[in-house]
Image (cartoon, helix red, strand yellow):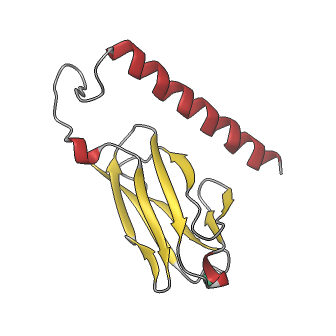
Amino acid sequence: MVKVIVSLLALSAASGCKNKSDSSTNSEGEAHSHNGKSHTHASQKGPFKVTVADHGYEPGELMIPANQPSEIIFTRTSKSACGEKVVFPDLKLEKELPLNTPVSVNVTVTKDKPIRFACGMDMMRGSIVAIQ
Ligand SMILES: [Cu+2]
């Protein structure tokens, strides 16, 4: 239980960090730079979406930028009870996914360590991997 609380605090800190970087760049929301080099396309910015469909997670492998907090929005469109919960074993995090209701999760992925997720029964599985 303590670990779950710690994870939630970490998520809050992550979103706070995102807000801080937004204000420090003082951009219009389009420009994006790391170390002065602009290289990230608009399509690589969050939020990123995962649909929980009858056949599983779509996409099953989600590519997001490495080393920065990103918002992932899960929406369950399948009426099957299988997808009612999404579990992130690496993050010690679980989220309930009400039908057709977007649920957001903030994660930071590193290149060497994809973040796995699965349904509550560990039947459907997906992962979040880092792109450059
Ligand atoms: Cu399941």
The image shows residue 6, relative to residue 19, as above or below, that is below
User: In this figure, what is the number of numbered marks?
Assistant: 0
Q: Is residue 13 above or below residue 85?
A: above
- Of all residues, the one furthest to the front in this rendering is 100
Residue at (46% x, 28% y) in the render: 18
When the figure is inspected, residue 16 is found, relative to residue 26, above or below; the finding is: below
* Residue drawn at (56%, 50%) of the image: 105
Can the viewer see residue 132 in this picture? Answer: no
Q: Residue furthest right?
A: 1
- In what quadrant does ligand 1 lie? bottom right
Residue 128 picture quarter: bottom left
Q: Is residue 112 left or right of residue 117?
A: left
**Identity of the residue drawn at 44% across and 64% down:** 50
Q: Nearer the viewer, residue 90 or 77?
A: 77
Q: Nearer the viewer, residue 112 or 64?
A: 64
Indicate the position of residue 1 as horizontal and vertical percent values. Answer: 83, 51
Q: Quadrant of residue 27?
A: top left
In percent of width and height, residue 99 lies at 62, 71
Where residue 28 sits in the image (x, y, percent)? Answer: 28, 22
Residue in view at x 32 percent, y 42 percent = 45
The answer, for residue 9, to whether it is visible in the render is: yes
- In the drawing, does residue 62 fall left or right of residue 100? left
Coordinates of residue 126 in the picture (x, y in percent): 46, 71
